[in-house]
């Protein structure tokens, strides 16, 4: 499509917002319509399990832009508007409450939703999830009065909430089916480092067990029972067992999906008038052996910029290096590249600096670096991986070896 015409964006989260902003930055002149089912202005999710939950910042500080930004940039933001279908032949999106909207190009930035936990008691009062601002607000209020918290799932969000609850002085138990935290995302040594950091902060873990039921009285959760038969009392339960991509609009419109809307290297679906970005999209990454679907701010933002550039007339395959961060109390975790799967994990640490980095290798090549409280390692790793450089495992393990110089000399 040319620089004019109507671009409709479904989903006004991190990716959808960024796309609208980047289209204008790139000089696209046509209509930009940003459709979001949530009632609020676009906001960022990362603080919801960290500073916002702690009570350090308020809702207006998580907004991506003030309301006037949208009018000033001629972005037609329609909040509280759910798209319920796509008519590909007529190039229209169907809305739940008003007239369909015609598009020249449609971008699906629908994100993901919390995975449900099919156990008795899952809908009792005192059981929370944290994906949206409204959910985070409900959890924030509950934490004010809570004494004991059970977190179900030792993934990034579960552990961020666990650290926040500990910082608020609450008793915290984390239940995890795998044998270690963030088992699918982190190397074994980094997972061990993370476990130790949380335990030092007073978090209790129960690994290798799952939730049998949530126990309640008078409609409110009072604790949980694990499949091992252990009962843990709690007045607040956070379920953080992963997400499901919102791919149904694409599937119902006859587009391919496989744990995410399938797109090509340009982030286009098989229908050239429809793209998909962010948490909902599965794309072929040059940093992985096959297609991947990532859940990170970097991924949503950079994919939005890639699509904006294409729609502005400068198409290029999406090639950004994936990176990610998570803050869990005093633990600042950063990941550069895609570390899974790997067949060799090399530790880099230095008692004088503290923290730990794990350099992950696949078939002898560096594929990613996990860093805990070593921000410099993370920055260097992004440089090395972006340039396709692979220090040897011996170099990575030697704290005296200058990785920065290696990157600078390339
Ligand atoms: C609590 C929390 C903490 C996080 N912390 C970090 C972090 O520390 N670092 C990091 O890199 N990432 C973090 N993330 C992940 C990051 O926020 C997401 O990867 C990012 O928001 C993805 O952007 P997106 O645009 O794809 O989806 P989203 O931001 O989720 O936006 C999708 C939007 O689409 C809307 N939508 C869906 N279907 C429809 C429809 N049919 N009609 C209209 N609207 C629709 C949804 O309601 C939603 O508002 C965190 C996520 C959460 C939930």
Image (cartoon, helix red, strand yellow):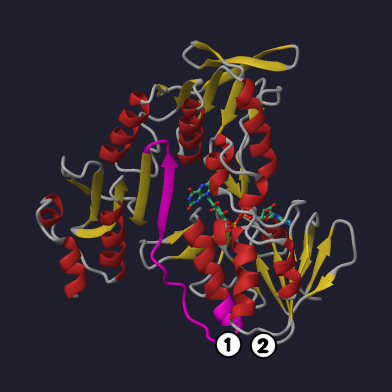
Mark yes or no: residue 353 visible: yes
x, y (%) of residue 272?
63, 78
x, y (%) of residue 182?
40, 38
Mark yes or no: residue 119 visible: no
312 inside magenta stretch: yes
Badge 2 marks a residue whose secondary structure is: loop
Relative vertical location of residue 225 with respect to residue 182 in this rendering, above or below: above
Relative vertical location of residue 75 with respect to residue 355 in this rendering, above or below: below
Splitting the image into 4 quarters, where does residue 64 fall? bottom right
Q: Quadrant of the N terminus?
A: bottom right
**Circle 1 residue:** 313
Q: Is the residue under label 2 in contact with that under label 1 (CB below 8 Å)?
A: yes
Badge 1 marks a residue whose secondary structure is: loop
For the residue carrying disc 2, how many other residues have a C-alpha within 10 Å: few (<14), some (14-19), or many (20+)? Answer: some
Range drawn in magenta: 308-330
For the point 25% across and 42% down, the residue is 355
Relative vertical location of residue 323 with respect to residue 4 in this rendering, above or below: above
Q: Earlier in the sequence, mark 1 or mark 2?
A: 2
How many numbered badges does the structure rendering display? 2
- Report, in whole angstroms, how far the alpha carbon at label 1 lies from the one at label 2: 7 Å
x, y (%) of residue 20?
65, 71
232 inside magenta stretch: no
């Amino acid at each position: 499509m040319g620089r004019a015409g109507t671009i409709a964006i479904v989903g006004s989260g991190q990716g959808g917002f960024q796309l609208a902003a980047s289209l204008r930055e790139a000089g696209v002149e046509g209509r930009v319509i940003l459709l979001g089912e949530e009632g609020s202005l676009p906001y960022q999710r990362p603080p919801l399990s960290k500073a916002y939950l702690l009570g350090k910042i308020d809702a207006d500080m998580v907004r991506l832009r003030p309301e006037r930004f949208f009018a000033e940039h001629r972005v037609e933001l329609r909040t509280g508007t759910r798209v319920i279908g796509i008519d590909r032949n007529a190039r229209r999106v169907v809305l739940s409450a008003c007239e369909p909207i015609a598009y020249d190009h449609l971008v699906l930035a629908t994100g993901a939703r919390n995975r449900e936990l099919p156990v008795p008691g899952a809908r009792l009062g005192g059981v929370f999830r944290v994906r949206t601002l409204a959910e985070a607000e409900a959890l924030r209020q509950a934490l004010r009065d809570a004494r004991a918290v059970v977190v179900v799932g030792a993934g990034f969000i579960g552990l961020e909430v666990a650290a926040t609850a500990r910082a608020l002085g609450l008793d915290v138990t984390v239940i995890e089916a795998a044998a270690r935290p963030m088992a699918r995302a982190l190397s074994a040594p980094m997972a061990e480092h993370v476990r130790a950091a949380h335990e030092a902060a007073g978090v209790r873990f129960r690994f290798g067990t799952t939730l049998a039921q949530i126990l309640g009285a008078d409609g409110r959760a009072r604790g949980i029972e694990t499949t091992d038969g252990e009962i843990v009392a709690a007045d607040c339960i956070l379920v953080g067992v992963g997400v499901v991509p919102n791919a149904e609009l694409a599937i119902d419109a006859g587009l391919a999906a496989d744990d995410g809307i399938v797109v090509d290297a340009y982030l286009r679906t098989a229908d050239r008038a429809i793209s998909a970005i962010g948490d909902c999209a599965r794309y072929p990454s040059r940093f992985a052996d096959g297609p991947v679907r990532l859940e990170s701010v970097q991924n949503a933002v950079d994919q939005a910029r890639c699509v904006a550039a294409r729609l502005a007339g400068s198409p290029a395959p999406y090639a950004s290096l994936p990176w990610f961060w998570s803050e869990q109390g005093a633990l600042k975790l950063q990941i550069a590249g895609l570390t899974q799967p790997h067949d060799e994990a090399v530790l880099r640490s230095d008692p004088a600096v503290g923290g730990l980095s794990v350099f992950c290798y696949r078939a002898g090549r560096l594929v990613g670096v996990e860093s805990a409280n070593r921000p410099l390692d993370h920055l260097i790793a992004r440089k090395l991986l972006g340039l396709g450089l692979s220090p040897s495992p011996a170099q990575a393990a030697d704290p005296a070896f200058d990785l920065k110089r290696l990157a600078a000399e390339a």
